[in-house]
Image (tube, rainbow, N blue to C red):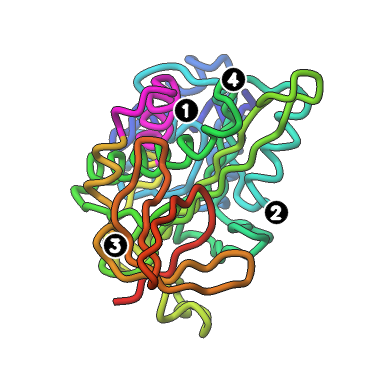
Amino acid sequence: MTTKESVLACLEQNRGRPLSGEALAEKLGLSRTAVWKAIKDLQKQGHAICPAQGRGYILQPESNVLSEQGIRRWLKTDVPPMIVAQEITSTNTTARELAAKGAAHGTLVIADRQTGGRGRRGRSFASPAGTGLYLSMIVRSQLPMEQVVLVTSAAAVAVCRAVEEVTGKQLSIKWVNDLFYGGKKCCGILTEAAADMESGGLDHLVVGIGLNLLPPKDGWPQELREIAGSIFEQGEPVDRCRLAAAIIEKLLEACALLPDTGFMQEYRRRNLVPGRDIYIVQNGSRRPAHAQAITNDGHLLVRLADGTPEELSFGEVSIRF
């Protein structure tokens, strides 16, 4: 760790309590000047570190800058390496590059802001700074390619569980990869698979999660105002590091249990789609149907307007209320 990272780790471990510059210097084997410079750099990055009237420095409880040290403070177990960036083009793109170089299962890329966030089918994903949580995890699994959709379903349940555990708020799922709160989309999940060219099986997956925690200060872009929402309102306290840690642990737990589909009962319970009249938007076509059920494989069972049953394993569903 760098000097700045080491100082931040100590402050995170004592968040809300004063630490003297002398104690920090002695613990880390640094000079008082080096500690002071690190504190100044951290303050410039937005960490709410205040002097404590002769008692040193305090990292304020409400400080909400994403950092590896802040996230690891909440993790109950060690996890593989993580990259936490204030700005990145796309967490999924970076994670895919790391996976291609052999990065381990569970490796994480997390950002405060994405300049080129992506959703399904190449759509852009709005990722403003300070309002969301953008996280991608490398998953190495022996799942056959036809069961990859289970990873997306498991990730949706993992995020719901993490949000409920940390905030008490309950999210709903829209088949196959969107989460809703208050009737609006607050989270998208993008799972990208890479094949092993020798075996033809799965080499790795990258699971990307984009979670809207607060509305943008200037409001949502015009094209998203009727669609996008957030879990919190402006002014509500949000501990993004704690929430990130909970999502990481829930996602690792969920992936470790695959291909067991015990989580699908909860996936169905939280799902908005079954029982609804919907449109199936697929390959440029738009067909009305009635959604009936979701199978343990994550497929959607529907009945078309002419009464024909159909089982969907991919595609996009637009709910018709």
In the rendered image, residue 20 lying in the magenta stretch gets the answer: no
- Given this view, does label 3 or label 1 mark the residue nearer the observer? 3
Locate residue 255: give its quadrant. Answer: top left
Residue highlighted by disc 2:
89
Question: What whole-number distance in Å separates the C-alpha atoms at marks 3 and 2?
Answer: 26 Å
User: In which quadrant is the N terminus drawn?
Assistant: top right
| Mark before the other along the chain sequence, 3 or 2 | 2
Residue highlighted by disc 3:
181
Residue 164 place in picture, x, y as percent: 23, 45
- Given this view, does label 1 or label 2 mark the residue nearer the observer? 2
Residue 291 place in picture, x, y as percent: 33, 60
Q: How many residues crowd mark 3 within 10 Å: few (<14), some (14–19), many (20+)?
A: some
- Given this view, does label 3 or label 4 mark the residue nearer the observer? 3
| Mark before the other along the chain sequence, 3 or 1 | 1
Residue 212 place in picture, x, y as percent: 42, 60
Residue highlighted by disc 1:
9
Quick one: 19 or 91, which is closer to the camera?
Answer: 91
User: Label 2 sits on what residue type?
Assistant: Thr
Residue 61 place in picture, x, y as percent: 30, 44
Q: Residue at x 28, y 66 (%)?
A: 276
Question: What whole-number distance in Å separates the C-alpha atoms at marks 1 and 4?
Answer: 14 Å
Q: Residue at x 54, y 25 (%)?
A: 106
| Mark before the other along the chain sequence, 3 or 4 | 4
Question: What whole-number distance in Å separates the C-alpha atoms at marks 2 and 4?
Answer: 35 Å
Q: How many residues crowd mark 2 within 10 Å: few (<14), some (14–19), many (20+)?
A: some
Q: How many residues crowd mark 4 within 10 Å: few (<14), some (14–19), many (20+)?
A: some
Quick one: 78 or 258, which is closer to the camera?
Answer: 258
